[in-house]
């Protein structure tokens, strides 16, 4: 099996501000595996959570390191490949790009989309939310109008955790609630930007505003405080930055209502499916999220979207120069193509 690695830069339509900073563009990694004249594609995007950072340079280097390791393998040997990559210390985002490329290869060889190979029902895919970043209230109103006009979204993911404090958070989301039609569902992601006291207060306040759930209210590393919030909050609590893989699902199962699975954190579709099944057995809800992914990585996540309760797969909608075409937004639902593999092509 031959593996190629290259990078590409994508620019955002609207710069996205969360509690940890603002992003206007990112450079992602494109991985291609080739065997028997068939080429499979995968993507990795950089991310950082606290002191855990996977930069573009580190991901590309890790993927290049994997290239020599993978030469003796056939693309269908995914179990052995996964073990070899983990044992070699290949970064999770690089493993994701490689594994998604292997699934794409398998689907192309079989002549079927991955979601069909997995026996999933595309009709069960729920609408995806679209994200409104931290902004002053009037800008948040404008961004809400922009996204609803562009996407006809059924739900909005509101980024909170403003460095100016929870009063600024309240002013922003109040403006959004006034701007968005009543039938548009609001969800909140604080990206670890609140203290426990602020989280307790905000969950009570947001419940009265009709918010559906709160994601990552406390920073990664403060998981010992989650049981207090879990018992007191009138809203479901999801974790994102605190939950990378199956081990974290088990560790956090007694203090959250749900988990946010991101392919870059967990290492690929296989581990994502494991996380879903474990979460289900523990009575937890499941959400999928994304980083600054193009439609290539988004289309990979969309293959297993029928397994999720909530979706936040919208990063590609905010790109001005996505080099790929793939999964499509139809009446608020992000649907993978009925084409072999991931159903992604170059623009």
Image (cartoon, rainbow, N blue to C red):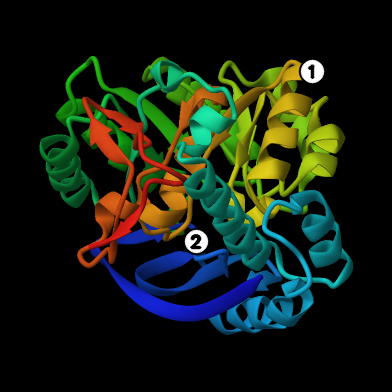
Q: Nearer the viewer, residue 83 or 151?
A: 83
Q: Which residue is mark 1?
A: 281
Residue 58 seen: yes
| Residue appearing at x 84%, y 56% in the figure | 80
Query: Can you give x and y, in whole percent of width and height, for residue 24 in the image?
Result: 32, 70
Q: Which label's residue is closer to the chain start, 2 or 1?
A: 2
Query: Can you give x and y, in whole percent of width and height, for residue 232 in the image?
Result: 69, 20
| Residue appearing at x 74%, y 82% in the figure | 68
Above or below, 19 against 260 in this view is below
Q: CB of mark 2 within 8 Å of CB of mark 1?
A: no
Left or right placement of residue 187 versus residue 218 in this view: left
Above or below, 302 against 192 in this view is above
Crowding around mark 2 (Cα neighbors within 10 Å: few <14, some 14 to 19, many 20+) is few
Crowding around mark 1 (Cα neighbors within 10 Å: few <14, some 14 to 19, many 20+) is few
Q: Which residue is mark 2?
A: 38
Query: Can you give x and y, in whole percent of width and height, for residue 144 in the image?
Result: 19, 40
What element does badge 1 sit on? helix
Residue 46 seen: no
**In front of the other: label 2 or label 1?**
2
* Residue furthest to the front: 36
Looking at the rendered image, the quarter that the C terminus falls into is bottom left
């Amino acid at each position: 099996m031959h593996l190629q690695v290259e990078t590409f830069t994508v620019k955002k339509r609207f710069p996205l501000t969360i509690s940890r900073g603002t992003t206007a563009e990112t450079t992602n990694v494109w991985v291609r595996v080739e065997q028997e004249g068939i080429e499979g594609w995968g993507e990795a995007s950089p991310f950082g959570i606290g002191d855990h950072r996977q930069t573009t340079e580190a991901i590309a280097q890790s993927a290049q390191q994997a290239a020599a390791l993978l030469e003796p393998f056939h693309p269908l040997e995914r179990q052995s490949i996964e073990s070899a990559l983990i044992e070699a210390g290949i970064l999770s985002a690089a493993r994701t790009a490689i594994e998604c490329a292997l699934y794409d290869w398998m689907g192309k060889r079989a002549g079927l989309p991955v979601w069909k190979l997995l026996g999933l029902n595309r009709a069960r895919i729920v609408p995806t939310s679209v994200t409104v970043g931290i902004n002053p209230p009037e800008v948040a109103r404008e961004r809400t109008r922009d996204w609803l006009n562009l996407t006809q979204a059924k739900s909005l993911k509101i980024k909170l955790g403003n460095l100016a404090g929870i009063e600024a958070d309240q002013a922003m989301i109040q403006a959004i609630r006034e701007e968005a039609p009543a039938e548009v569902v609001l969800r909140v992601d604080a990206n670890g930007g609140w203290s426990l006291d602020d989280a307790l207060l905000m969950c009570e306040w947001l419940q009265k505003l009709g918010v559906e759930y709160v994601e990552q209210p406390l920073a990664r590393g403060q998981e010992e405080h989650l049981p207090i919030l879990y018992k007191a909050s009138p809203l479901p609590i999801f974790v994102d930055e605190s939950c990378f893989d199956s081990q974290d699902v088990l560790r956090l199962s007694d203090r959250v209502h749900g988990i946010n699975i991101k392919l870059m954190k967990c290492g690929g579709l296989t581990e994502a499916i494991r996380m879903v099944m474990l979460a289900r057995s523990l009575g937890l809800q499941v959400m999928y999220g994304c980083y600054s992914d193009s439609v290539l990585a988004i289309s990979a996540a969309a293959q297993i979207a029928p397994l999720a309760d909530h979706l936040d797969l919208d990063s590609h909608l905010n790109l001005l120069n996505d080099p790929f075409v793939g999964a499509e937004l139809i009446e608020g639902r992000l649907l993978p193509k009925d084409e072999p593999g991931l159903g992604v092509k170059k623009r």
